[in-house]
Amino acid sequence: MKKWFIPIFILCSSSAHAAWLYERTVTISSVPSNSGDVTNLPVPLTFSDVTLSTSVSGGHLQNANGFDIKMSSDSSCSTTLQIDTETMNTTGSGTYIGWFSAPVVSSWTTHTVWLCYGNSSITHFIGTSTSTWDSSYVYGSHTQLIGSTVSLNDFTRVNSTGSFVGYVSSITAVIDGGIQTPQPATGGVDNYFDTGYKWANGQSLTETIGFWTNAPAQSGIAVSFLTDSASGISQESLIFQNSATNWEILFGDADLVTCIFTDTVGPDGNWHYVVAEVNGDTGSGSTCYLYVDGSLHGSHSTSTQTGSYSSGSTYHYGNTASGFTVPLPYAGDQLTISTDLKSADYINATYKSQVIGNTFLVVGAETPITPSSSSNAVFFGTEM
């Protein structure tokens, strides 16, 4: 009996990204005023669209908590960028605010990343909030506005727990919410947010402090400060406006490094991004740097040796009635403290990415993801 061998081919396909249903391009603008590229910059993405809300609200997120959101450096949604979610849009009419680590912010060309969302297999938050910020950050607060209540959450690895002292209320600010404090009576009660963060005992003084402030349009003393003022120890980091045109920065322990800058933006009632830096104790003195709205407004060197910090109380963020003759109201947002010196390009790119009304990020139209298939032939035969 003659036997026949009949070959059978079965074509199999596999889907590369069937899990994610939708994506949008996110174009990162260049910063022509910078001298070079900035890498791994935390950038806020603010987006108001019903599609980026949960399905019960008419959106395309599959997870009830909105966990199925991802930033990716490729259009296949396979390479994850670290994200730090500040505010979820769970109602369909709200605004999503999330921070992601931009791989590169160029001085001459745009770059594209992808926002991927809608994935029923996601059951938990897939980002790492702390990794969105490099390890030099020891404190940071988003100043989240929830209704009429403001919440300051430490998004760094330190995870400090803060508290409000005196009278502190919420205000609509630069990214989301901010804090505001009324004018205290001279020598009266201080009004501030206690960050809960304390500088390590004996730690050398090198730091970068950045925050948004909205000082009133009047002369006198508009205080925007952080301070670690343990009993018997002078203020260790104090940043304030001592007149309509002057910023004064005090760094140090018992021996203060005093830096006064007179060519800066004075209190005018508008939001300004302020960064103060000190390069630490070099053995022969220190240098302070002041940036306002992304631009270096001056540096100041001192021969006073700063030494290292002694353990003290925690950093405060607000205003004070003590030690100043004309304390004024204060408003602030998005405070960060890091233990390194950020470059001028880094500070400028940070300002450009956060300033009100900016178009630093351009979000493209929603695109349904069509599964891309790869085919493989499977061969086997049968005898007849």
Image (cartoon, rainbow, N blue to C red):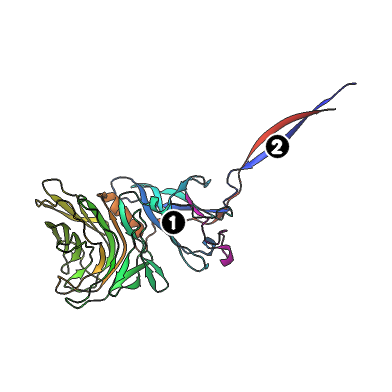
Q: Please give the label number shown on residue 253.
A: none
**Is disc 2 placed on a helix, strand or loop?**
strand
Given residues 252 and 114, the one toward you in this image is 252
On screen, residue 74 above or below 354: above
Q: Position of residue 89 (x, y in %)?
A: 49, 64
Determine if residue 271 is in view.
no
Which region of the structure is painted magenta? 54-71
The answer to which image quadrant residue 1 occupies is top right
Given residues 254 and 56, the one toward you in this image is 254
**Is disc 1 placed on a helix, strand or loop?**
strand
Given residues 229 and 186, the one toward you in this image is 229
Q: Earlier in the sequence, mark 1 or mark 2?
A: 2
- Classify mark 1: residues with Cα within 10 Å, few (<14), some (14-19) or many (20+): some
Q: Who's the residue at 51% across and 45% down the image? A: 78
The residue sitting at the right extreme is: 1
Q: Is residue 93 left or right of residue 264?
A: right
Per the image, is 133 magenta? no
Q: Which residue is mark 1?
A: 362
